[in-house]
Image (cartoon, rainbow, N blue to C red):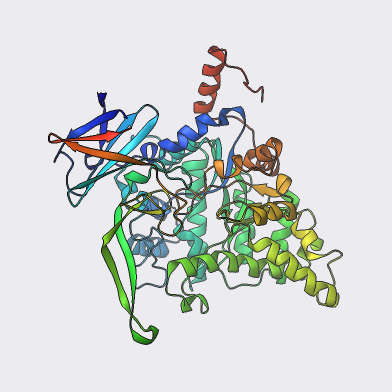
Amino acid sequence: MNEHTRSFRDLSSETFDTRTLLKNAAEQAIDRRYEDFFIADVDSHHYETEAFKEIAEFIEDPVLRHEAKFQGTSRGGISSESGSYQEIAGRITRYPERKNEIVPPKPHRDIVLMERWMDQLGVDVAVMFPTPMLNLSNCPRHEVEVGLSFAYNRWLCDTILDKEPRIKSMLYLPFHDPEACCKIIEQFGERKGVVGFMVTATHYTRNYQNPYMKMYSMLQERDMPLGFHAAFTWADQSLALTNRFIAVHGLGFTWCNMLHMANWLVNGMPERFPKLKTIWIESGLAWIPFMMQRLDNEFMMRTSDAPLLKRRPSEYMREMFFTSQPMEMVDNRKALEVTFEMINAPTQLLYSSDYPHWDMDLPATIYDLPFIDMQAKKNILGGNAQKLFKLDPVLSPVKQARLAARKAAGIAGVAAE
Amino acid sequence: MPEVLVCKDGEIAEGGVRLIRVGREEIGVIRHRDKYYAYRNLCPHQGGPACEGLRMPQVVDRIGEGGILLGQTFDEDDMHIVCPWHGYEFHLADGCHVIDRQIRLKKYNVVQRGGEIYVAV
């Protein structure tokens, strides 16, 4: 029997649209009934470069503002130290195509693009970070880092966070200038949508130095978490030995957080600031068991090296928070299960997509795991973030509509959450 | 096996893709070097729309005598379907992942008859 197709799509005539790219994600969300529970994405991104003309207007120093408007902020070309081919030389199509996506004049383009992917994935609330600014800490001119971080944070609060309650952020701290970090916490700590503060992890500073203690105290007093967001820089002397992106990315995104984690622990920061919550962002999970085993083994032989620690390093790590992406999932189910046990995932792991980046993870990476129960899945997908960031667990309008449709249709299993 | 008419031969441009929906499944019909291939538009990795990405040839490290790297090139005879979500690559010829053949796109037979292209579903 032959049957004519009634409709077809011809990709050559389609304009890029996030909703189309992610339509299979929306099917996953429907199939798995994500409308039954709250999902928070603790690490997602936008490209602040696209709004950089706006952001530059928020720079207070007129000389720096002029320079920023003249130079822009786009990354360099293939030969620059930060130049890379994260998008696998065009294979991840949302990188080159994103600029062609058509959005309505209001609300802000970043809000529209965020909401489009969030709705398709089933995410209710997302913590949004910038992208190229993750390497701003490598700028040799510290006053530029400070000026841009104030401008970006003001722009973000005024333009995005004030306007859209589903988008939150942990604000960028210019880590080379501890006093400026304190000013940012004072100035923006109460702003709508600010759920914590974030250090990008590719800096070359020592997080245990005395000038930082005031900042940690301030965050502890405010009960606001401090995130270390991993990144990589090809300018790093060791990583400059790599010639393929997979190597610089695979090592760089874990190495920088391993370095800061080791310093954080052996200098006894968890004992000095026992109520300060730390989040280790975007290094995946496989590095954590390694660090736990390695540090515990060495610590038991030389406790005098870390005299502030009253317990094994792994015990402090087990009380920290970790974001899930990029979760190592290829042929390693046993290792992943052990990792979940070692980090106490049901209370400490926070789902993150990292969308729109090339190695993004969908909620199904957590939802489909065979070795944790449904309550643990719900915790990781949203409940842990809800507690940590004191989020209001409101479902997105799309999910509310889906739930209402199910109720109207009398479909069983509608959760009362 | 039922056949679904996709289009007339030549309606899909060389290197192009037409996506058709059969029930809940979307199928990508790809034309490459005047041959047609059909796969489910669903990546076995995380569910991305595999047929909506680029087709890219196998990248080859050219190694000379004594293990010397001579440079890189493309093997144009081994075209890949690249999932646009994460970059998983599958041989266009059979839909198998380029490293792990157990990971594969669902393949459909393509029938060319009377100047028309059909997919057997």
Q: Could you say where residue B52 lies in the image, as x and y percent from the top left?
A: 32, 44
In the picture as drawn, the residue positioned furthest to the bottom comes out as B66
Residue at 75% over, 70% down? A295
Note whether residue A133 is visible: yes
The quadrant of the rendering that contains the C terminus of chain B is: top left
Q: Which quadrant of the structure image shows residue A393?
A: top right
x, y (%) of residue A264?
72, 66
The quarter of the displayed image where residue A86 is located: bottom left
Residue A393 left/right relative to B5:
right
Q: Position of residue B81 (x, y in %)?
A: 33, 51
Number of numbered discs on residues: 0
Q: Residue at x 76, y 54 (%)?
A: A319
Q: Residue at x 33, y 48 (%)?
A: B53
Look at the image and tell me whether residue A103 can be seen. Answer: no
Rendering quarter of residue A314: bottom right
Reply above or below: A416 against A131. above
Q: Nearer the viewer, residue B82 or A157?
A: B82
- Which x, y percent locates residue B113? 16, 35
Q: Taking A34 as reference, is A275 left or right? A: right
Q: Quadrant of the N terminus of chain B?
A: top left
Question: Which residue sits at x=57%, y=31%?
Answer: A34
Say which of A327 and A79 sits in front: A327
Using the image, determine if residue A109 lies above or below residue A93.
above
